Amino acid sequence: MKLADNKATLSFSNGSPSVELPVYKGTIGPDVVDIRKLYAQTGMFTYDPGFLSTAATQSAITYIDGDKGELLYRGYPIEQLATDCDFMETCHLLLYGELPNAKGKKDFSRLVTMHTMVNEQMQFFLRGFRRDAHPMAIMTGLVGALSAFYHDSTDINNPQHREIAAIRLIAKMPTLVAMAYKYTVGQPYMYPKNDLSYAGNFLHMMFATPCEPYEVNPVLERALDRIFTLHADHEQNASTSTVRLCGSSGTNPFAAIAAGVACLWGPAHGGANEAALNMLHDIQKAGGVEKIGEFIKQVKDKNSGVKLMGFGHRVYKNYDPRAKLMQETCKEVLAELGLENDPLFKLAMALEKIALEDEYFVSRKLYPNVDFYSGIVQRAIGIPVPLFTAVFALARTVGWIAQLNEMIGDPEYKIGRPRQLFDGSVRRDVAPIDNR
């Protein structure tokens, strides 16, 4: 971050003296106006609901250009990472700033592999949940509970503690998600296998049983690895900001990540792919492909309250770059599993075609987003709809940790404390109870 050549001048129509504010430039993206001394100079705060125009931090991890439809991890385009790298390489990049060489990748992957088991007592912890509990309810509890098992990595200000907590979280998230799934379906937990890849191991823990050998399908393994890579980080979104805000109090990394899991659960954030699949199910129940025209009519009617889920994006005002990659993977997976003619998938492809051609959606740039395709892929693989958000949390964990570590290492970081515009009652006195 460097000081820009120009400064911002804030002037007031009531005759108060104007204020000069510094302007800083990033390497790419919009400049920022530094308002840290605004209150001291003017006695006023800025007002920005949702923080849509506020940069709360400086970061070197992820950059999004919503107008261009561009996503960069540490400067690398997501298209190149999803095509030429795997998730372990992406994790290394996000955590340490650089892609690993062959030896670095092998060492890092081995380190993660050696931490995939969880304490056996976690099984007893799981039994406290109802069998029909939502997987995200279980995950918020399990991730937070890790801090009760790993006391040697809970000091957020200790670099060694942060390092081992990072590896533990990345390694154990697939195990916890698979355990949550097995618990809800009443099957025995499957232990991790050290000879499998990160994605392959997750598939094994999810779908293997002790009854017979499980063969990992390489097409599904590659698809899942790509889902993880595409969801690994996404700049200062709601859950990442939650992790940063939670971590700014000095709490342990497991608690901060559990807060991120809780935030991700919301249907406007991590639950979007679940909402997209539920929408497809609803159309299917109403009559399938033949009812799409009727559904689209309702979407266009502002008074109907019907929303098109899995299309458009808060940040991308162009095509979501992750969606194109996920679309390719979607077609590969459906072809591999012979599901091109599955009624729900035919419905999804018909809906996609209309949205890409209908002027109403094209003019509003309501393109299919990554949630639309990743939901279809996960269902095809056999992952149940309620587990989609937990898989998202698994993938996003590395981004949360990278952002948390960056914040802790920032000499300017302080405990988060947003301000408010108060519009409640002015000071008043309590009347005796008989006079109220």
Image (cartoon, rainbow, N blue to C red):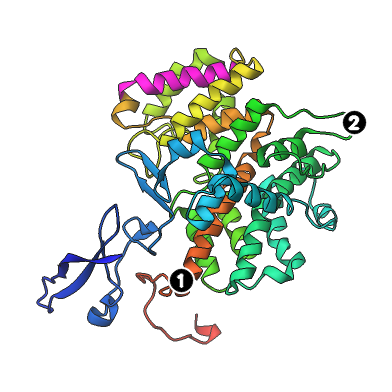
The quadrant where residue 190 appears: top right
Question: Looking at the magenta stretch, what is its main secondary structure?
Answer: helix
On the rendered structure, is 36 left or right of 434?
left
Judged from the image, the secondary structure of the residue bearing numbered disc 1 is loop
Q: Please state which amino acid type lies under the numbered disc 1.
A: Gly
Vertically, is 204 above or below 401? above
Disc 1 packing (10 Å; few <14; some 14–19; many ≥20): few
Q: Residue at x 54, y 47 (%)?
A: 101
Q: Residue at x 77, y 45 (%)?
A: 179
The residue singled out by tag 1 in the image is 416
User: Residue 313 placed where, x, y %?
Assistant: 40, 39
The residue singled out by tag 2 in the image is 211
Query: Whole-Å distance between the Cαs marked 2 and 1?
Result: 51 Å
Q: Which portion, as a residue range, is magenta?
A: 343-359
User: Residue 211 placed where, x, y %?
Assistant: 90, 31
Q: Residue at x 70, y 36 (%)?
A: 200
Q: Earlier in the sequence, mark 2 or mark 1?
A: 2
User: Residue 404 placed where, x, y %?
Assistant: 52, 63
Q: Compare residues 173 and 161 and report the one nearer the observer.
A: 161
